[in-house]
Amino acid sequence: MFTRKIKLSIAATVLASSIGAYVYAADADTPSKYPAEPIHEVEFYGSPSSSISSGVSVPTGASYLFTSGTVPPLLNKDGKTVYERYGDTKTQATGVLKTIEKQLADKGLSLKDVVYLRVYVTPDAAKDNKFDFAGWNEAYALFFNNADNPVKTARSTVGVPALVSPDWLIEIEAVAVYPKPHKQN
């Protein structure tokens, strides 16, 4: 009796898997709403009124540069408060983006080549322990989606409880794409 139940259970699983595979394969004939045309340069898409892109298409064969999480530079080692040592969220974000700008320049890139930012913001004690997303957005606007750099990166901004240092209010990771085929030097 027990063996029969196991055999029926296995048969039912195989049958269900087969039906699922058939349905999945049949759906492959449904055309995508996006044309399958190759792209030759980075393409940003999304709402024209948004300060960021909804997404980015990158051509096949492009080379990427990923930065590690970059944290704020120390402004005053003798400062008595987080704001004297590192500044508020806008000041810290500005410092981080300047550091990323230098990292990119060392590899022959600029902020115009950045396609994606991942940003971690912590609560600010001076703002009733709320996230200062406005400060971050103000800093972002100094570097992106402006007359000097019209690029609107795709971006994720995540509120987290803390970073490695309690003085840091923001940490940023960047992804840039080399504008043409790139060989490691």
Image (cartoon, rainbow, N blue to C red):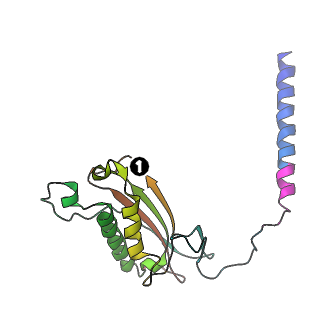
- Residue at horizontal 25 percent and vertical 62 percent from the top: 87
Measured as percent of width and height from the top left, residue 130 is found at 37, 50
The one nearer the camera, 60 or 80, is 80
**Residue 84 locus on image (x, y percent):** 18, 60
The residue sitting at 45% across, 80% down in the picture is: 146
Residue 38 position within the rendered picture, expressed as x and y whole percent measured from the top left = 70, 78
Q: Start and end of the magenta stretch? A: 22-32
Residue 50 in picture, x, y percent from top left: 54, 70
**Quadrant in the picture for residue 142:** bottom left
Relative height, residue 103 to residue 25 (above, below): below
Residue at left 84%, top 62%? 30
Give the residue at x 33% y 65%.
Answer: 90
| Residue 30 inside the magenta-drawn segment | yes
In the image, residue 170 above or below residue 166: below
Badge 1, how many Cα within 10 Å: few under 14, some, many 20+?
Answer: some
Residue at the extreme top of the image, as rendered: 1
Per the image, the residue denoted by label 1 is: 160
Q: Quadrant of residue 6?
A: top right
Question: Total marks drawn?
Answer: 1
Is 118 magenta? The answer is: no
Task: Mark yes or no: residue 68 visible.
Answer: no
7 or 155, nearer to the observer = 155
The type of residue carrying mark 1 is Val
Screen quadrant of the N terminus: top right
- Residue nearest the observer in this picture, 116 or 28: 116
